[in-house]
Amino acid sequence: MNITKLLNSLSAARMEYESIDYSVLNRFVVPFKIDQLDLRNQNISIALVGSRGSGKSTYIQYFSHATRFDKSLPSVEISELECIVLYWKPDIAYCQGLNESWLGVEHAERFFMNHASIEIIGEFMRMISNVQYHFPEQLIKVTYEDSNILRALKNISNNEIESLEQVERWIDDQRFDLSTRLNPINIDGMLSLDPKTTLNYLINNFERDCPVFKNTRFKIFIDEFELLNESQQIQINSYRKDSKAKISWNVAYKLHAKTTRETRSNQPLQEPDDFITEVLDDLIKDNFALYAAEIFLLSVKSAGIDCSSVNVNAQDLGDRNKILDRENLKYREKVLGAIKKLLPTPKVKELSSDAYLSSSWLRKKVKDIVDNEGRERSLIDRIMLDTSMAVTIVGTYLQKSFNLDMFLNGGASSDDKINTYEFNSLLTFRNQNSQLTLPVYSGFDRFIAMTTPNVRHFKVLCFNSLKQLDEKSKSTDISFFEEIQPITPEKMDYAAVTTSKLLVDEIISYPPYGNKLYMLVNRIGELFKTSQKSSYQTEPERDIFAIKYDYANSEPEMEDILSAGEAWKVLISDDSKRLKSDSQYTSKEYVLNPIFSPKFGISYRKKRGIVFDLEEFKILINGSSDDFDKIRNKYRKSWKCDSTISNENADGQMKDQGTLL
Amino acid sequence: MINISEWESCECNDLIKRVGKVEYDVAFSGAHLIDDRTSWVGNYLKKVSTTTEIVKFDYHESALGIGDNSVPIRNLDSQIIPPNSRILIDATTLAFPELLYLFNNLNSNGFDFDVLYVQPQEYGNDEKVELGDIQPMRLSLDGLGPKTLAPYVQFSSRASMLVFLGFEGHRLGSISNSDIFGMPEYSCLLGIPGFKAGWENKAVYNNMSYLSELNIRNILISGANDPIYTYEVIENQYNAAKYSRKNLFLAPLGTKPAGVAAANFAVNNPSNLGIVYDFIQSKVGRSSGTDIAHKWKFKFSKE
C-alpha cells in the first residue's frame, strides 16, 4: 500500500455509507461521554439535536435494534430487551411534497400518516426479525400461524397479509400504491392508518405473543424532524406530548433548526414537562482531539494501513465497555503521538524563529523601531536573541502604550504581552507580506482547534494534508501508519487554506439562504482580514461580531438568516461578553466557523471584534458592493489601517513611520 | 401528449424583421425584465401577440397565477383560454415550474402551441469583484431551496436523480446539501455543445467540486439548446430507472431548452417521475445581449 492508493481509497469512502438495515455495528466510534446520553435511559421524550455532521443518525442507530441485535453479533444480553429503540427516517422529498395547499389538509395528512405507518410497520418487523435471531425461544409464538402479531397485521392490511414472510412484500406494494396516487390524486380504496395507533396495536399484540416484552419500553426516533412540513411536525408533536414510559415518540434535528412546538391540541409541547433536549455536540466536544484522531486512524486502517504503535480497531472503538481503556493515558499518548508525528504542530515561538520567519526581515523591522525610538543599535542584537519578543515588539510598536523598556526589562508584563500578541503579530506579518511563509494554521493541535466538533472537517484537513506529500513519498510502499513521512508545516498550512476556501465556497449551496450567508461570511471575513492586516494592532485578533439588536423579531428575515447560519454551522454564537459596547443589545456574539479562518488569514481564537449597527449588518447581507466598500473604509479608518505612512506616537502626536512595515 | 413537430432558429434581429401581422392570440410570459433578451422578448411579444399574460407559480399556494387569475395546481386541467387560441409561450422569461404547469394545462385541453427561447450573448456576474478570490458563479439570488413540484411527488428512497447542470454549480450542491433526497444515485446532464464554444467548459468547471464530492460517474450530454435530443436522454434514463424498479427524479437546473424538454417529458410521463426545482430568483443583469432565437412548435396528440 502507498499513499496514493490510500488517498484514492479515502476519497471513495468520503461518500457517506448508509446501510439499508441501519446497523452501525463496527462503523461507529463511541464518544467518550456516551454514558451521559444513553437514549434508552430517559423515560421522557427526547429531542436529540446536533450540528451538521455531528452524527445524529448514526448515534440513534447505535442504540437502535438494528445495531443492538445485529445478526452478526455472537450473542446479546437479555438486558437489551429492557428498552428497544426503533428508528424512522422519513422520506423527506415525499413528505415535503405533500403540500396542503395542493392536496388539501385532509388528504395531505392522510398520505403522510399512511407513509409513516407503513414505514413504522416495516421497522417494527425488522426489529422482530433481529430480536428473534438472538432470542428465538422467547419469540417462538410469533412464528405460529395463530399468533397475535399476525392477526394484527392481517387486520391492518385488510387480510392481504397471510404470513410474516409476506409483510415485506405487502409493505413494498403499499409504497408502490401510495406512489401512484398523487399524479393524479386518487384516494379511492386507499389505506387509512394512524402511525401511533398502529404501533400501539402491534406492540400490544407482540407482547401477547411474547410476555418477556411485558416490561420492555419502546422508543421510536424520528430523524430529520426539522425537514418535515409544519403540519407533519405538529402531528408528531401530538404523539410526543402523549408519550408514555412504555412507548415514547422522540425526534432528532439539526442544532438551531427551526421547528414548531405546536400540537393538535391547544397545548404546545413544553420543556422539560413533555420532552428534554439533548445536544450531541456537547458530548463530542469532550476529548475531541482523541476522538477525531481515532476516527482518522480507523479510516486509514480501513483503507489498508494499520498503526504499529497502537491497536485501533472498529470493534473496540464501537464498544462502550472499552471507553476506560481508551481513556487510559498510555493509549491516549500512543494515538495522539502517532497522529502528531504525522501532523506536527510548530509552537508559536517556533513560528517566530528563523525556521519560518526570515530573520533578516525581522531584524530590519527591529532596527527601524530602535532607530525611531532613538536608542542604541546595540539593542538590536539583544532583542533578536528572543525572536518572540522581537515579533511582539514589531507587532505592537504602533500601540499608544508601547514601551520598549517594558520588553527589555522582561518579567510578567513582557511575558503577558508576548502571550497575547505574538500570534496576532505573526498573522499580521503573514497578511502584509505574501513572501513570508508563516504556517500559522499548521499542525494537529490547530486542526483540532479549527474543527471541533466537526469530524468531517478534521478528516478533510488530514486528507488534504496527505495530498501535499511529494510524488516520491506518495508512491513509496509502506506497511504502517507510522512510516508515513511527517507533513511539513508549510504543506499543512497550504492544505488548511485550500480546505478553508473550498468550505467557504460551499456555503452558497446551503439552502435557502446560501447566497446571503456566502456574502455575509465573505464580507465579515474581509473586514477581519482588513483588521488583521493593519500594522496598528491595538487589541488582540478581531474575529468576533455582535449586532446592536434585541432579537425581538423586528427583523424576521435577518434572524432567519442568522439562525440558518447557525444551523449550517457557518456562524457560531455564544452569550459571552467579550465585546465592549455602550449598548445593552449585544446579547449574542458570533464568530465565523474557525475552519474559515485560513481563507481570510484571520485568527481561529476568539479574542476581540466588532459591534455592528443594525443597518450596517443588513448591508453585509444584502447591500451592494459600493455600500460594503463604505463600511470597509469606515473600519479601515477607525482601525487606522493606513497608519504605515504616518503613525501616532505615545503622546498621540503624528510621527513619521514611513519605512516601518 | 405533446411533442415538438418543428424547430426554427434564427438571429433575433432576423426574427423581428420578419414580423408582419399578429401571429398569436395570447402569449405567456414571465413578469421580470432583467436583461437585454427579456426586454427584447417583451418587445417581440407586443408585436406578434394580441395579448400577453404574465404567468407566475406560487409554491406556497400551489397555484399558477395567469394574469389576474389563479389556477390551483389540483385543477390544472381547467380551461384557461378560449378554444382554438393561437398560443406562444416565452421560455426565456418563464421559470421551469411555469413552463411545466402551462404545458400540462395546454396538454389537458388539447392545444397546440409554440415556445420561444432567446439565447444571450453573454452570461456574467454584474457585480464588481469585491472579495479578491475567484468566486462561484452567481447569476441568481436565493430561492426557496430544492422542492418537489406537485404533482410530481415521489418517494426518493428508491430513486435516481438526473440533474441538469448549468453555470451555477452550487445549485447541484444545494440539492445534495438539502438532505431532502435520500438517494445516493445521481446522474448529470451537461449541455454539450453549449450555446457558444467553450461555455460547456464553464459548466463543467463550476460543477466539478460537486461532481467529485457526490462521486457522480454517469454524466450525459445533449446540446444545450436541443430539447429534442434531451428528451431522448431523459427517456433513456427513465426507462433504465423503471427496469430497476426505481423512480426517476428530474432536477432541471440547466439551460432552458433542457428545461423545455423536461417539462415536455413530464407531461407525457406522469407516473414514476419526480421533479425537483430550487426556485432561484434570476438576478438583474444575469445576461447581456441577444443571440439566436429558437421557436419550437408543439403538437398535441391523443395517446
Image: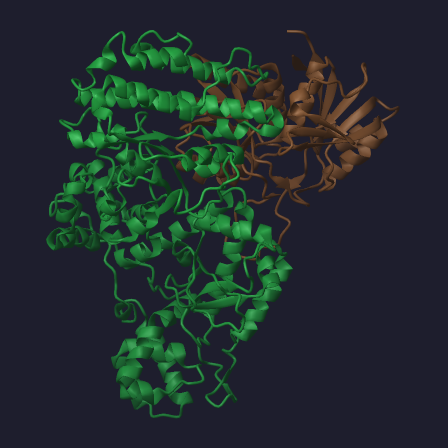
Chain colours: A green, B brown
**Residue farthest to the right?**
B21
Q: Is residue B10 visible?
A: yes
Left-right relation of A200 to B171: left
Q: Quadrant of the N terminus of chain A?
A: top left
Q: Residue A409: percent from the left, percent from the top?
A: 28, 88
In the rendered structure, the answer to whether residue A396 lies left or right of residue B237 reads: left
A102 or A571: nearer the eye?
A102
Above or below A560: residue B120 = above
Q: Is residue A653 left or right of residue A251?
A: right
Residue depicted at 62% across the width and 52% down the height:
B127
Identify the image quadrant of the C terminus of chain A: bottom left
Query: Quadrant of residue B216 in the image?
Result: top left
Percent of width and height locating residue A331: 13, 51
Q: Which sits in the foreground, A49 or A154?
A: A154
> Which of the 4 quarters of the picture holds residue A138?
top left
Going 25% across and 60% down the picture, which residue do you hit? A345
Image point (24%, 35%), residue name:
A27
Q: Position of residue B125 (x, y in %)?
A: 61, 47
- Looking at the image, residue A264 lies above or below residue A406: above
Q: Position of residue A359 (x, y in %)?
A: 31, 74
Q: In the rendered view, would you say B247 is above or below B290?
A: above
Q: Is residue A597 above or below residue B34?
A: below
Q: Nearer the viewer, residue A143 or A424?
A: A143
Q: Nearer the viewer, residue B34 or A194?
A: A194
